[in-house]
Structures are given as structure tokens and as C-alpha cells.
Amino acid sequence: MSSRDVTLSGVTTHKIRKGITFYANDSVVTPVAPGPPDQPRPLLLLLPWLGSKPQAQAKYCEIYLRTGFDVLAVETEVGRFLWPRWGLEYGGQLLELLESERFSQRPLLVHAFSIGGYTFAQMLVHVAKDPQRYQGFTSRIRGQIYDSLVVGSVERMAIGVSQNLFPRWGGLVKRTSLLYFHIFKRQTMDYFNISIDAFWNTSVRAPALFFFCNNDVLCDPKTLEEMVEHWEKQGISVTSKKWEESIHAGHLRAHPQEYMSILENFLYSVNKVPLKAKL
């Protein structure tokens, strides 16, 4: 195990490749949903925020592992964001992994934080291009959770890169990023627009939950609320929680009881089994 891994009790850790870790639940727990004994264990696709610490990821892993999920944690590298073609290739590789023999029969839940939503959007670009091929993948998704999704202008994306990776040099990195996006528009912004369109017009019809706040500089709450309304018009059941003040990708830390109550209710509505996890 590398220094970025965290040991979780009753869990076997499999390092699939750099940035992708599979946590197999060895504990005997109540199934997430009723069904036959041989029903495949459900899988959480965890897409953390840029530069997230292992200990922070572990807190969310534990919530789902105690509920009966296995967890596939997929980190987003900054290079795949700054050069979206790499991100798009990576999205295709993730779809192949989720359709491999190990995971192809698993019911899925998606929990994406911040820029992790960008990685999922890149997966949706492939789905939009060939919906029949990926119909099995989209139909296996029971629910989708988005926490502090980066939504809005390119300036917000630049702020996200600077604050998450280079907080001491935030202003300089932000200006440099904006210049970079302008110079390489065809290689960056055009790709971003395609992934944004794929996300807004998603093929995933599973119920969705959004956590966000008014004081998050990386998320334009008005734009996010417009997207929620757009999804609802498409027939997607959407639950959202907006705080006046909170922490980007840290709502669980800032509002633990409320966060867990909303998450529990959402998971119960999706799986019909109570969430048995302790903070």
C-alpha cells in the first residue's frame, strides 16, 4: 500500500492502477437492497475532489462500506483536466473497467465531489456518442450524488485549479490558467463545452442529490439551480440542499448531522434500506 492509501477495518484494498483503488467489503452486513442471496454487492463509484487527502476520502468510504457497498475510488489528475483529451480517454477507460467481468453486474451509485463531476461528465460524453452500447451501464445506476459540483464560467474552473493545488499562488495560477484556456481553446474549452452538454443532457435517469452552498467561489448556485430545473423537466427526480455558508467539498464537516440525514433519506429512497453508518 502506498502512503496515499488508508487501512479500513474489515476491508481488502486492491490497487487497480494509479489513482484507482477498489475497497472490497469483507464484513457481514445487511444488504443494501433486498434480493436473492447471490445478488451482486452494489458498488459505489467515488470521484473525490482534486488533491483530496486519503483520510478525507476514507470518511466517505466508511459510510458506504458500513452500509454494504464495495467502493471504487477514482481520483482526478490535474493533467486530465488541463488537457481534456486525456480526460476523455480516461473516461473511456473507466467505462471499460466498470463493464469488465469484476463489475459488469454490479448495481451502481455515483458520488462525485467538485471536479470529480468533470470525470463523470467525460464518461457521459462516451455514453452520449453510443447510448445503445452503454445502456447496460446507465441502467445499473441507482442514484447519483453531486457534492460541491464545479459549475459556471471558465474563471471558476481556473479558481478551482489554483485553490486546490496552489493556494499560496492562487492569483497567479488563476491568471495563468485563464491565459492557457484562451490560447488552447480548441484543445480545452471546446472539449469542456462538449462534456458540459453531455452532463446537462445526461442519459442517466436515476434519482440525483446535489449538495452546494451560496459562498462557494467554485460553484455558481444560480447556474446549478438552472441545471437542476432542467433535469427535473427531463423527468429526473432531483433532491438538492443549499446552505448559505459552508465549505467546498466539506459540507459533511461543516454540517454533519444535516448532511447525513439528507444522505440517509436519499439512499433509503433509492435502496429502501436504512443507512447504518456512524460519523
Image (cartoon, rainbow, N blue to C red):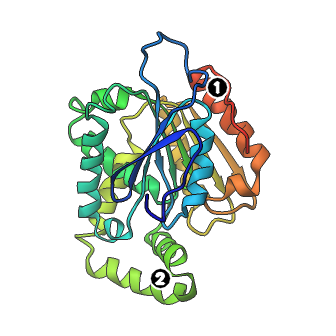
Query: Where's the N terminus, which quadrant?
Result: bottom left
Q: Which residue is mark 2?
A: 174
Question: Based on the displayed image, in which of its 4 quarters is residue 148 positioned?
Answer: bottom right
Q: Residue furthest right?
A: 257
Give the residue displayed 50% in from the left and 11% down from the top.
35
The span from disc 1 to disc 2 (Cα, nearest Å) is 41 Å
Task: Indicate whether 127 appears above or below 80.
Answer: above
Give the residue displayed 56% in from the left and 66% down from the top.
218
Relative to 42, 249 lies left or right: right
Q: Which residue is mark 1?
A: 268
Task: Indicate whether 149 appears above or below 40.
Answer: below
Give the residue displayed 68% in from the left and 45% down from the top.
241
x and y percent of residue 110 in the render?
Answer: 47, 40
Question: Based on the displayed image, in which of its 4 quarters is residue 271 positioned?
Answer: top right
Q: Please tell me which residue lies in front, 39 or 250.
A: 39
Residue flagged by tag 1: what amino acid is it?
Answer: Tyr
* Crowd rating for badge 1 (residues with CA inside 10 Å; few <14, some 14–19, many 20+): some
x and y percent of residue 126 in the render?
Answer: 25, 45
Q: Residue furthest top?
A: 36
Looking at marks 1 and 2 on the same chain, the residue that comes earlier in the sequence is marked by 2
Task: Indicate whether 249 appears above or below 70.
Answer: below
x and y percent of residue 211 in the render?
Answer: 63, 49
Residue flagged by tag 2: what amino acid is it?
Answer: Lys
